[in-house]
Amino acid sequence: MISAKVYSQNNQEVGDIDLLENVFSVSVKPELLHQAVRAHRAAVRSGTVGVKNRAIISGGGRKPWRQKGTGRARAGTGRSPLWRGGAVIHGPKARDYSIKLNKKVRRLALKMALSAKYAQDKLQVLDRIQLDKIKTRDFVNIKNNLGLKKPLIVTAEKSNTLELSARNVPGVEVITQDSINVYEVLKHQELVMEKQAVEKLQERLA
């Protein structure tokens, strides 16, 4: 069993928390983290692009002019890709970019990402983060007191006040523990978690 110190949002030590070794002390395999990041980034691609080819474009059913005798080049359709208003050759098509990743692999990759932050001393556990009102300045004061630069803040429950207060601060993101993923953990310099969020996450991943 390993542990981490718990601080208040004013950067005062208020206790500690036990961390599960099979969640925060897992051997890190970079190739597995790479797969998880690729899968996450591929999943957020919409893939809804599309153009009309000759099979689906309207019109063009009649031959524009007779084959011979006009002096013009032969033409079979007015919707040729060479003509204005025509179809598109080899245009992009709607597709699904997602990469399949087994559930066990996703869970293991998340454990590795959490373990990497803990090993690098980039994990900070707070008793709780609470703001009385939506105020960016108040959030920045808390951030500066904790010595944070570009943190990922993980809360136990959704907090609109905190999310809206942090929304305009560059490099900062606030998510709930059930939305945590490998990409966000690795992208940010620090990982800040509420104590209750750590407990719920450990319960889910153990």
Image (tube, helix red, strand yellow):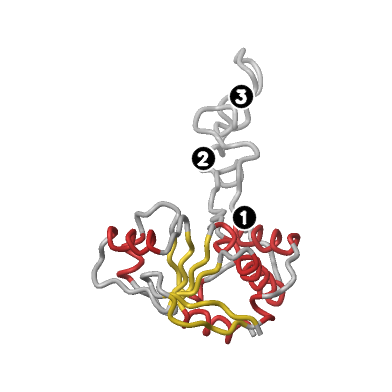
Please, what is the three-letter code of the amino acid marked with disc 1? Arg
Tell me which label, 3 or 2, sits earlier in the chain: 2
Q: Is 146 on the left or on the right of 165, as rendered?
A: right
In three-dimensional space, the C-alpha distance between marks 2 and 1, rounded to whole angstroms, equals 26 Å
Q: Is residue 69 above or below residue 117?
A: above
Q: Position of residue 11 (x, y in %)?
A: 40, 70
Q: Is residue 65 above or below residue 114?
A: above
Q: Which mark is residue 87?
A: none
Q: Which mark is residue 95?
A: 1
Q: Which residue is mark 2?
A: 59
The crowd level at tag 1 (other Cα within 10 Å; few <14, some 14-19, many 20+) is few
Q: Which residue is mark 3?
A: 66
The crowd level at tag 3 (other Cα within 10 Å; few <14, some 14-19, many 20+) is few
Q: Is 53 on the left or on the right of 31, as rendered?
A: left
Q: Residue furthest left?
A: 133
Q: Nearer the viewer, residue 91 or 178?
A: 178
Identify the residue at image location x=29%, y=71%.
Answer: 131
Tell me which label, 1 or 3, sits earlier in the chain: 3
Q: Nearer the viewer, mark 2 or mark 1?
A: 1
Mark 2, secondary structure of its residue = loop
Q: Quadrant of the C terminus?
A: bottom right
Q: Position of residue 39 (x, y in %)?
A: 65, 61
